[in-house]
Image (cartoon, rainbow, N blue to C red):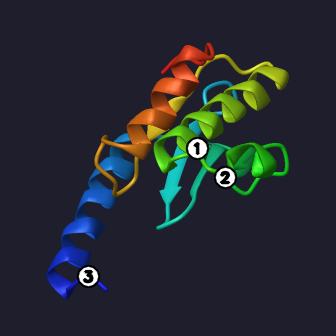
Amino acid sequence: MASKKIEKIRAKRKARVRGKVSGTETRPRLSVFRSANHIYVQAIADDVGKTLAAASTLSGELVGNLDGKKKVDAAKEVGKLISKRLKDLGVNEAVFDRGRYLYHGRVKALAEAARESGLKF
């Protein structure tokens, strides 16, 4: 478990990032959560307070395909999946909310895979 100082730093970073980013129905906020084993992303329309789409390494479409893959590769698959789900809803643009995580590793892989799949942010 992280020390209180680290938790305080993470909370400040999250508040700083979240203060600058807001989503709408036409351009939702892609909010990322990363745990030790999984990565989750939601497309959130803050103006109406609604989650438009979500994807994670636990999504039914990905569970069987991720066996034996590294975490970064799994994050890329999640990025492609969220991009596909948003395109099915007619959304082509989004705002990326990395939360308290640095734009590095799995978070970066997810974002770049979503961009490669045609999502603009």
Q: What element carries label 2?
A: loop
Label 1 crowd (10 A; few <14 / some 14-19 / many >=20): many
**Residue 46 percent across, percent down from the top left:** 61, 46
Mark 3 element type? loop
Residue position marked by numbered label 2 in the rendering? 57
Q: Nearer the viewer, mark 1 or mark 3?
A: 1
Q: How crowded is mark 3: few (under 14 residues within 10 Å), some or many (20 or more)?
A: few
Earlier in the chain: of badge 3 and badge 2, it is 3
Q: In this view, does 99 lie above or below 36?
A: above
Rendered image: mark on residue 121: none
What distance separates the C-alpha of mark 3 from that of mark 2? 24 Å
Seen from this angle, which residue lies furthest front? 68
Q: What residue type is labelled 2?
A: Thr
Residue at position x 68%, y 24% in the image:
26
Q: Do the residues labelled 2 and 1 touch (CB within 8 Å)?
A: yes
Give, as a three-letter code, the residue at label 1.
Ala
Residue corresponding to mark 3:
2
Residue at (62, 17) in percent of width and height: 117
In which quadrant of the rendered view does residue 79 lie? Answer: top right
- The residue carrying mark 1 is 74
Image quarter hosting the N terminus:
bottom left
Q: What element carries label 1?
A: helix
The answer to which of 99 and 45 lies nearer the viewer is 99
* Position in image of residue 61 (x %, y %): 83, 43
Q: Is residue 20 left or right of residue 56?
A: left
Report the residue at 55% width, 15% height from top. 116
